[in-house]
Amino acid sequence: MKAARIFLFLTVLLCLGAVTASAFEFGDVAPDFELPGLDGKTFRLSDHRGQIVILKLGTTWCPTCKQQSFELAEAAPFLKKNNIKVVEVFLQDTREMITEYLAKERHPKELIPLLDDGQVRRKYNVYLIPRLLVVNREFQIVRDGSLLTSQALQNLIRPMLKKGGKG
């Protein structure tokens, strides 16, 4: 019973403590990674240098992660119009869990779902979820934090579009 309480406490801490989830400063270079997508294709972050990329780190079972997915879905028309990649790295889920989650939860249709093998968790020092990072065209992190509304995300990205990608 004690182990179950500890697990519950850690789960709640993981989901609700995302307010201080950042690990990178504005302008830091985004750590590269290569992961398999659910479609079987390999995704390498550095292949998207020159594009704005939104990187969501989370799980299928975290309520706040689901809320962030909803906010991304709300921003989907804006993101699609501006050719912004939305990449979601699932940190603790199986392929089956992710497939089931994507079938019933609202998310951007252009979402690139990836299955973490531990490298993103290590490279991005993930200890709280969800984490939402925005990487500019120069491969610099311009935002690293927790939950962000659709409107706030769009407001963050608009100046990057006008300046040619710099944050």
Image (spheres, rainbow, N blue to C red):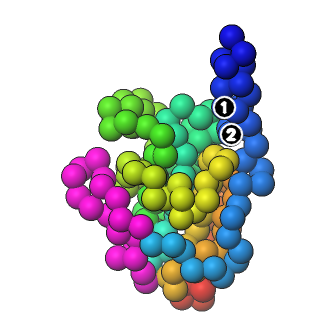
Percent position of residue 139, x then y: 51, 80
In the image, residue 38 sits, relative to residue 167, either above or below, namely above
Labelled disc at residue 89: none
Q: What's under tag 1, amino acid-wise?
A: Thr
Image quarter hosting the N terminus: top right
Q: What's under tag 2, amino acid-wise?
A: Leu
- Residue 71 counted in the magenta span: no
Can residue 113 be seen at all in this image of the molecule?
no
Q: In this figure, which residue is indicated by the disc labeled 1?
A: 11
Provide the secondary structure element on which disc 1 rests.
helix
Image quarter hosting the C terminus: bottom right
Kindly identify the residue that appears in the image at 72 percent across and 16 percent down: 2
Percent position of residue 135, x then y: 55, 73
Q: In this figure, which residue is indicated by the disc labeled 2?
A: 14
Q: Give the range drawn in magenta.
A: 33-50
- Residue 38 counted in the magenta span: yes
Q: Confirm or deny contact between disc 2 and disc 1 (CB under 8 A).
A: yes
Provide the secondary structure element on which disc 2 rests.
helix
In the image, residue 10 sits, relative to residue 19, either above or below, namely above
